[in-house]
Amino acid sequence: MIRLIVGLGNPGLRFANTRHNVGFIFVDSAISKWGEWIEETGKGILGKISIDSNNVLILKPFTYMNRSGEAIPPIVERFSILPQEILVVYDDLWIPLGSVRLRIKGSSGGHNGMQSVIDALNTEDIPRLRIGIGPLPEGASSVDFVLSEFSEEELRILDETIESAIEGLPLIITDIEKAMSRYNKRIKG
């Protein structure tokens, strides 16, 4: 059972609509559908959603992406949450836009935000939902690409993808393995 969802991104208006902030976009959507932001924690903002009588905490770190993990230990300790009960949501430039991938554990795959979370919790056994923002255009810098904004057409596809993933959230939080078999495929945009 997932008890905490952490959306990864960069704080501030400058980064609000960039590809690297799809984790923030996801948790904002979950809050607007099922819950509310309840308090600032020092290194983030904490919210709560209620889905089918399951209460789940939502965390949006105020640290920059590469230090996202710093916001998690105080919440984990305060609420006695295990790493396996956390769902980390973030962008993945190796997954095509319009697709999502759920995993129950694994390496960071080169994603600095996820690596920060792994380092902070000292384990790779952390469920994650990766939202595709790719492909990386030929010859483009990955840093410039993830910090670029979506085009109108890309935003339409992203919105549909986020909406679909949000619809799947009740299953994800109660049975992530079943959700993996259902959602680890291309979502038609």
Image (cartoon, rainbow, N blue to C red):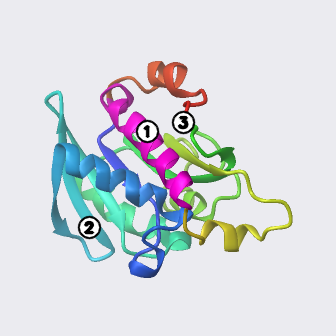
Q: Position of residue 81 (x, y in %)?
A: 31, 46
Tell me the magenta residue range. Answer: 151-173
- The x, y position of residue 188, in whole percent, is 56, 30
Assess disc 1: are there few (<14), some (14-19) or many (≥20) residues with their C-alpha within 10 Å of its C-alpha.
some
**Which of marks 2 and 3 precedes in the sequence?**
2
Q: Residues within 10 Å of mark 3 (few under 14, many from 20)?
A: few
State which quadrant residue 85 falls in.
top left
Q: On the picture, is 19 further left or further right than 35?
A: right
Say which residue appears at 44% left-offset and 40% top-offset.
160
Q: Which residue is mark 2?
A: 45
The extreme front residue here reads: 152
As measured in the structure, the alpha-carbon distance from the residue carrying label 3 to the one carrying label 1 is 31 Å
Residue 186 is at least partly visible in this image:
yes
> Answer yes or no: do the residues labelled 2 and 1 have beta carbons within 8 Å?
no
Residue 189 image label: 3
Q: Position of residue 144 (x, y in %)?
A: 68, 74
Q: Main secondary structure of the magenta part?
A: helix
Seen at 58% across and 38% down, the residue is 99
Residue 155, horizontal then vertical, whole percent: 49, 54
SS under mark 1: helix
